[in-house]
Image: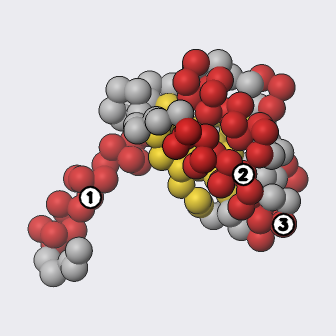
């Protein structure tokens, strides 16, 4: 879409507001989920491309339609790459560290589908603190 006016920009903002809400506070469409994969140099060097592919393939294999995988820049935890942030509507974001292909499939099957957080892989963060 070409932006030709402030009205066009406002329309795009309104159409995408739910995406930002899901990332920041868990507010979004019921049952919606978004999985962010850090794809900077350190992530790619430790297998983030394979993690991204495994997540995408598992979502497809499970026929999940309300889940999207988003490659992003730096999530900020280079020491624990590949890093994945899971945002599920109505829940606080969860960060996972050292996510390989098997762990990626587990995230989809357990966290996304069964609402079971993989506690052994959670990256403790200060998310939400001032």
Q: Earlier in the sequence, mark 1 or mark 3?
A: 1
Q: Nearer the viewer, mark 2 or mark 1?
A: 2
Where residue 116 appears, as percent x and y from the top left, is 65, 18
Disc 2 versus disc 3: distance between alpha carbons? 12 Å
Q: Earlier in the sequence, mark 2 or mark 1?
A: 1
Give the mark, 2 or 3, whose residue is nearer the N terminus: 3
Q: Residues within 10 Å of mark 2 (few under 14, many from 20)?
A: many
**Front-most of residues 104 and 32:** 104
Q: Secondary structure at mark 1?
A: helix
In the rendered image, which residue does mark 2 sit on? 51
Residue 35 rendering spot, x and y as whole percentages = 57, 44
Residue 113 versus residue 25 in the image, above or below:
above
Q: Is residue 24 visible?
A: no
In the image, residue 82 lies at what x, y percent?
78, 52
* Residue 18 drawn at (x, y percent): 33, 43
Question: Which picture quadrant has residue 89?
Answer: top left
Q: Is residue 120 left or right of residue 39?
A: right
Find residue 13 and name its label.
1
Q: Which residue is mark 3?
A: 45
Secondary element at image label 2: helix
Residue at 40 percent across and 37 percent down: it is 66
Relative vertical location of residue 125 with respect to residue 37 in this rendering, above or below: above
In the foreground, 7 or 35: 35
Residue at 80%, 32% (x, y): give it: 121
């Amino acid at each position: 879409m070409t932006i030709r006016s402030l009205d066009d920009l406002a329309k795009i903002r309104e159409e995408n507001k739910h995406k930002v809400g899901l990332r920041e506070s868990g507010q979004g469409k019921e049952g919606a989920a978004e999985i962010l994969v850090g794809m900077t140099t350190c992530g790619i060097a430790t297998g983030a491309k394979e993690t991204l592919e495994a997540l995408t393939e598992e979502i497809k294999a499970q026929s999940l339609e309300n889940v999207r995988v988003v490659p992003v820049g730096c999530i900020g935890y280079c020491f624990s790459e590949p890093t994945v942030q899971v945002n599920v509507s109505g829940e606080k974001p969860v960060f996972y560290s050292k996510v390989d292909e098997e762990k990626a499939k587990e995230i989809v099957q357990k966290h996304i589908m069964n609402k079971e957080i993989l506690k052994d892989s959670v990256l403790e963060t200060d998310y939400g603190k001032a």
